[in-house]
Image (cartoon, rainbow, N blue to C red):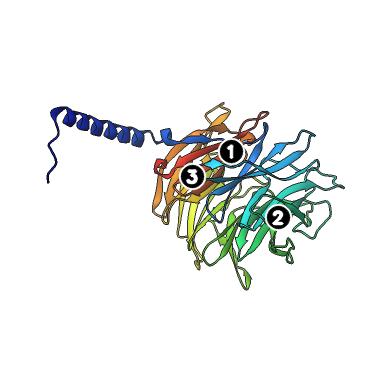
Amino acid sequence: MAGRPLSPRARVAATAALLIAAAIVAWWQRYPAAAMQPLAVAAAPGARLPRLAAHPAGGAVLSWVEPAPDGGHVLRVARYRDGRFAAPVEVARGQDWFVNWSDFPSVVPIATDFWLAHWLVRHPRADSPYHYGIALALSRDDGHHWTRVPAPHADAGPAEHGFAAIAALDGRAAMVWLDGRANDARHTFALRTTDIERDGTATAERIIDGDVCTCCWPALARTRNDLWVAYRGRTTDEIRDFQLRHRSAEGWSAPIALAGEGWSIAGCPVNGVSLAARGERLAAAWFTAAGGTARVRAAFIRDGANSLEAVHDIDAASPVGRAAIAWLNDDTAAALHIAAPAAGADLADLRLTRVSPAGVGRALTLTQVPANRDSGVPQLMAVGSEVLVAWTGAAPVYGLHILHVPLRAVP
């Protein structure tokens, strides 16, 4: 039976509701930043150096370093799910840590019963500020309790071992780091790797590349078939471009150039690379200033390929860089970076840009962050229908800043 026709008053009310809804949608589409919301986490004053990692059961984990009351430092981690952070858990603390804006700890869940954390400890016989090693701890109960395990590197001398990256690999934790044990007048560093077993023991170290840039953070990511590493290489004539390699049963592949810009620079630019994997696809984002033009770029590659699928400039207007990338769906990623500050300004835009093999979308300015090293290395992770963005506030207060961005807000 047909329902009764609406009264004139009801028709007016229904029409008004539709018009209001349409206006809200139109306004939201025009001002997507209004959908972004800050997130709170129970970090102590002075907390900094956030790092995000995926949880195997969904959601994410956020780790950071905060000052201890006794003058040392504490590494904490908090689980993120259902739109909120759980109470943080202490992973480790110490008086002898090396704490640096670009070379900082991580906490990575390999499985719910195998989490691995790393941080940096000064060498007791250090005669340089950069003589430090990598410390490890593992958790067998989803990050609630932690046990210290041996360092991943056999070298125990006063040398630099840092800029570590960790990824899951067939139940183990694969790990890479920049290693300065062979440091000489030329500042020769190697990219080394090992696997950490579930009991915390490390397999024999291997050298992936014996001559790399000394302080640009590398990245690891696991596609369906391969483990990939990206790092800034180095040639004898000081070309410092990013390279990709993938690992098989036979070992690490020959390098694949990330665009091969030919950036010649006689020193480390301290601007690393980001990788994100989804199925058979890999996305990368990085900074270069080859040819005197500072740019943030993104590229895509597939398992089994020996060349890039596509390369795009995200920002060619002299950005600060410190890029990150995350997949939004099977075809599209989002790249995060710090843009160039205005002349004489202390702050710069933190921008999120949709990018795919087909091209680059419009950038969304999330906020402004310190253009110097205070903001650290901003973090990006896609979690369900949202992305999380984290960065450090300005010194001397610092503080963690975390932003929730719905995927629909990314233009």
Residue at horizontal 59%, vertical 42%? 86
Q: In the image, is residue 341 above or below residue 261?
A: above
Residue at horizontal 51%, vertical 57%? 277
Mark 2 or mark 3, which has the lower sequence index? 2
Label 2 secondary element: strand
Residue count near mark 2 (Cα–Cα under 10 Å), binned few <14, some 14–19, many ≥20: many
Q: Nearer the viewer, residue 50 or 219?
A: 50
Please tell me whether mark 1 or mark 3 is closer to you in this view. Answer: 3
Tell me whether circle 2 and circle 1 mark residues in contact (CB < 8 Å). Answer: no
Please tell me whether mark 2 or mark 3 is closer to you in this view. Answer: 2
Q: In the image, is residue 79 above or below residue 277?
A: above
Q: Which quarter of the rendering shows the C terminus?
A: top left
Residue count near mark 3 (Cα–Cα under 10 Å), binned few <14, some 14–19, many ≥20: many
| Residue 257 location, quadrant | bottom right
Residue 346 visible at all:
yes
Q: Callout 1, which amino acid?
A: Trp
State the residue position of label 2: 138
Q: Callout 2, which amino acid?
A: Leu
Residue 218 visible at all:
no
Q: Marks 1/3: CA distance?
A: 14 Å
Q: Nearer the viewer, residue 91 or 26?
A: 91
Q: Callout 3, which amino acid?
A: Val
Please tell me whether mark 2 or mark 1 is closer to you in this view. Answer: 2
In the rendered structure, the answer to whether residue 3 lies left or right of residue 109 reads left
State the residue position of label 3: 387
Query: How many marks do you count on the picture?
Result: 3
Q: Marks 2/3: CA distance?
A: 27 Å
Q: Nearer the viewer, residue 171 or 245?
A: 171
Q: Residue furthest front?
A: 1
State the residue position of label 1: 391
